[in-house]
Image (cartoon, rainbow, N blue to C red):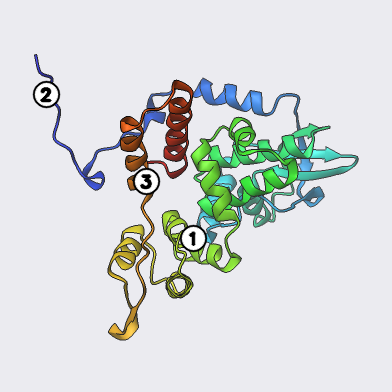
C-alpha cells in the first residue's frame, strides 16, 4: 500500500504549535536547579550590584516599562543571579529585571541567587544559557556571546557546542557573524536584518560588489535574504530615486551545487572504503556548516 502525503506548503502558510503548552513546568525547574546548583537565595541591595557587560545588548524601552509595571504589581517572580567575590556582587543573569526595578524608587533590594567560587568559563556558560532560555536573544548578541566565550576559554567549536548546548552549524555561523564589522552588526539590530543577509554578504569576494551591498545594508535598504539573492543574481541594486547600480554577480559555485557535485562524482569513482568514508564525512560536515 502506497503511503499518501499531504501536499507541500510554503513556510508562511504552515501552522505552528507552542510545544511549551504541553510541557510539565517541573522540567524548567529541574533545568534551573541544575544551572544554579550551590546558589544561596538572599536579598541584596540594588546599589550593591555591579552590572558588567552582558550577553544581551539590545533592550526595548517599552518592554522594560511593562516589566517594571508587572514587578510593581506582582513583585519579582524570578530572582536575579549574582556572583559574589569578597563583598562585591556581580550581576550574571537578569539585567532586564534589574533595569526595570531600578526605575521603581520604592524597590531598593531584590531576591537573588548568589553563586560563589565559579570560574569565568562557568559564569559565561550560565549567563548564555539563562539569557537564551528566558527570552529570544538577538542573533548578534548570541554571536558576540559565543565569540566572547571562545576568546575566554580558547575552546574549539566542538567544545563550545557541548558546553552551550547549541548545534555545530549555529556555532560556526555565529563566530563568523561575531567577527564582522561593528557597524554592520549594529545595523542588523537597528533594522532587524536577517542573519543570512550578513552571511551572504560575507561570502561575496568581488570588492566592488561587496562594498555596494554593504552600503545598502548599513542604510537599512536591504534586510531580507531573498532580496540580496535576487540582487546577486541580477547584478543590479536599485537605490533611492530608482537609480540603478550595476554589480558583478558572483560566479562562485553554491554550497548546494558543490555538495551535489561531490556526491555524484564520488559514486562514479573507484575509491577504497577508507577514502569513500572520508569523502562522505566531508560532505556531511559541509552540510552541517551551511545547514542545507
Of the numbered discs in the image, which one, if any, rests on residue 202? 1
The numbered mark, 3 or 1, whose residue comes first in the sequence reads 1
The numbered mark, 2 or 1, whose residue comes first in the sequence reads 2
Q: Label 3, on which residue? A: 258
Q: For the residues marked 2 and 1, what is the alpha-carbon distance in whole angstroms? A: 42 Å
Q: Can residue 76 be seen by looking at this rendering? A: no
Residue nearest the viewer, comparing 198 with 82: 198
Which residue ends up furthest to the left in the rendered image? Answer: 1
Q: Are marks 2 and 3 in contact (CB under 8 Å)?
A: no
Image position of 197 (left or right of 103): left
Quadrant that contains the N terminus: top left
**Residue 160: x and y, percent?**
62, 36
At 77% from the left and 34% from the top, the residue drawn is: 114
**Residue 251: x and y, percent?**
36, 62
Q: For the residues marked 3 and 1, what is the alpha-carbon distance in whole angstroms? A: 18 Å
Q: For the residues marked 2 and 3, what is the alpha-carbon distance in whole angstroms? A: 32 Å
**Secondary element at tag 1:** helix
Q: Is residue 241 above or below residue 226?
A: below
Q: What is the crowding at mark 2: few (fewer than 14 residues within 10 Å), some, or many (at least 20)?
A: few
Q: What is the crowding at mark 1: few (fewer than 14 residues within 10 Å), some, or many (at least 20)?
A: some
Image position of 22 (left or right of 107): left
Q: Label 2, on which residue? A: 4
In terms of image quadrants, where is residue 37?
top right
**Secondary element at tag 2:** loop
Amino acid at each position: 500500500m502506497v503511503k499518501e502525503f499531504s501536499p507541500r506548503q510554503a513556510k508562511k502558510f504552515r501552522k505552528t504549535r507552542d510545544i511549551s503548552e504541553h510541557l510539565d513546568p517541573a522540567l524548567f525547574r529541574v533545568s534551573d536547579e541544575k544551572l544554579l546548583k550551590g546558589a544561596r537565595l538572599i536579598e541584596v541591595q540594588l546599589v550593591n550590584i555591579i552590572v558588567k557587560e552582558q550577553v544581551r545588548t539590545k533592550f526595548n524601552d517599552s518592554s522594560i516599562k511593562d516589566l517594571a509595571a508587572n514587578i510593581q504589581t506582582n513583585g519579582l517572580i524570578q530572582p536575579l543571579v549574582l556572583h559574589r567575590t569578597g563583598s562585591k556582587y556581580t550581576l550574571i543573569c537578569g539585567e532586564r529585571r534589574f533595569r526595570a526595578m531600578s526605575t521603581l524608587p520604592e524597590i531598593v533590594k531584590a531576591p537573588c541567587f548568589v553563586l560563589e567560587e565559579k570560574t569565568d568559563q562557568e559564569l559565561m556558560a550560565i549567563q548564555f544559557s539563562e539569557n537564551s532560555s528566558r527570552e529570544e536573544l538577538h542573533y548578534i548578541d548570541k554571536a558576540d556571546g559565543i565569540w566572547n566565550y571562545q576568546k575566554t576559554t580558547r575552546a574549539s567549536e566542538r567544545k563550545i557546542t557541548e558546553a552551550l548546548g547549541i548545534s555545530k552549524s549555529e556555532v560556526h555561523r555565529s563566530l563568523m557573524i561575531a567577527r564582522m564589522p561593528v557597524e554592520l552588526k549594529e545595523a542588523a539590530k537597528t533594522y532587524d536584518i536577517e542573519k543570512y543577509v550578513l552571511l551572504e554578504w560575507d561570502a561575496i569576494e568581488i570588492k566592488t560588489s561587496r562594498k555596494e551591498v554593504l552600503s545598502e545594508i548599513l542604510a537599512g535598504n536591504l534586510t531580507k535574504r531573498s532580496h540580496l539573492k535576487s540582487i546577486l543574481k541580477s547584478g543590479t541594486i536599485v537605490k533611492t530615486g530608482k537609480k540603478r547600480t550595476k554589480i558583478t554577480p558572483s560566479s562562485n559555485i553554491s554550497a548546494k551545487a558543490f555538495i551535489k557535485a561531490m556526491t555524484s562524482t564520488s559514486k562514479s569513482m573507484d575509491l577504497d572504503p577508507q577514502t569513500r568514508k572520508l569523502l562522505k564525512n566531508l560532505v556531511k560536515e559541509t552540510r552541517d556548516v551551511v545547514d542545507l
